[in-house]
Amino acid sequence: MKDASATPKRSTLESPPPRPLGPFLEERTTLRVRFNEVDALRIVWHGHYANYFEEGRRAFGRRYGVDYTAFIEHNVAVPIVQLHVDYFAPARLADTLEVKARLYKSEAAKLIFEYEIRREGEVPLLASGTSVQVFTNFKGELLLTWPLFMQERLKAWEPMWKHPLPNPPSA
C-alpha cells in the first residue's frame, strides 16, 4: 500500500507561471472568428485560443524567418512543452481579433512566447498566455544547445530586441 503522505500535493488552482521579462521581439496578426469556433453559448470555445496563439507564432515566424518550414529544413522540431492561458472576456462570432505574439530573449535553447488577444481596435484583453517550446531532433531527442541556424538568427536579431519600459514608481 502506498504512503499517501509521500505523494506531492497539488493545489486545484495553481498560480500562473511568472510573466516573461527582458528583451523581446513581437509581431501582430488579425483573424476573424469563424462559425465552427463558437459553442452553444455563442462564444469562442476555450480550446481555440491555443490555435489563435499558434497563428500569432506563425505570423512571428514569417516575419523573423523562423516559420515551421525553416525548422523542418534544418531537421529540428519545436514541440510545445508548456502552455498557459488566462481568459478575461469572450470572443464572439465574426469578431476580428488581434493576436500579439512576443518572443522573449533566452540564454537557454527554448522559445518563450507571450500572447495577448484583443478585439481589433480595442484595449481590453480577451485572453493572454504563454508557451514554451524546446528543440528536438526528429527522433524526439532534446537539443540542449541552440541549433546553428537559430544561433545565426539570434545574432541577426541582436539590434532588433525591444526592451520593456520600466514600471513607474508606486505613489
Image: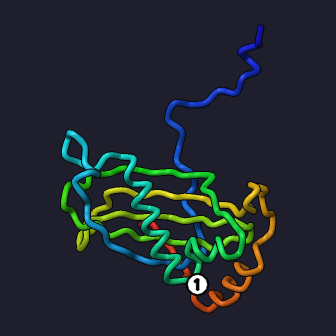
Q: Position of residue 27 (x, y in %)?
A: 45, 78
**Is 41 placed above or below 127 here?**
above
Which of the image's four quarters has the C terminus?
Answer: bottom left
Label 1 crowding class (10 Å Cα cut-off): few <14, some 14-19, many 20+? some
Does dot 1 land on a helix, a strand or a loop?
loop
The quadrant in which residue 149 appears is bottom right
Q: Position of residue 10 (x, y in %)?
A: 61, 30
**In the drawing, does residue 37 fall left or right of residue 10?**
left
**In the drawing, does residue 64 fall left or right of residue 109?**
left
Q: Position of residue 145 (x, y in %)?
A: 80, 69
**In the drawing, does residue 89 fall left or right of residue 46?**
left
Tag 1: amino acid: Trp
| 104 or 145: nearer the viewer | 145
Disc 1 marks which residue?
161
Q: Residue at x 39, y 61 (%)?
A: 52
Q: Residue at x 57, y 55 (%)?
A: 18
The quadrant in which residue 55 appears is bottom left
| 97 or 170: nearer the viewer | 97
**Is 141 placed above or below 27 here?**
above
Q: Position of residue 78 (x, y in %)?
A: 64, 63
In the displayed orientation, state which residue is furthest to the top.
Answer: 1
The quadrant in which residue 156 appears is bottom right
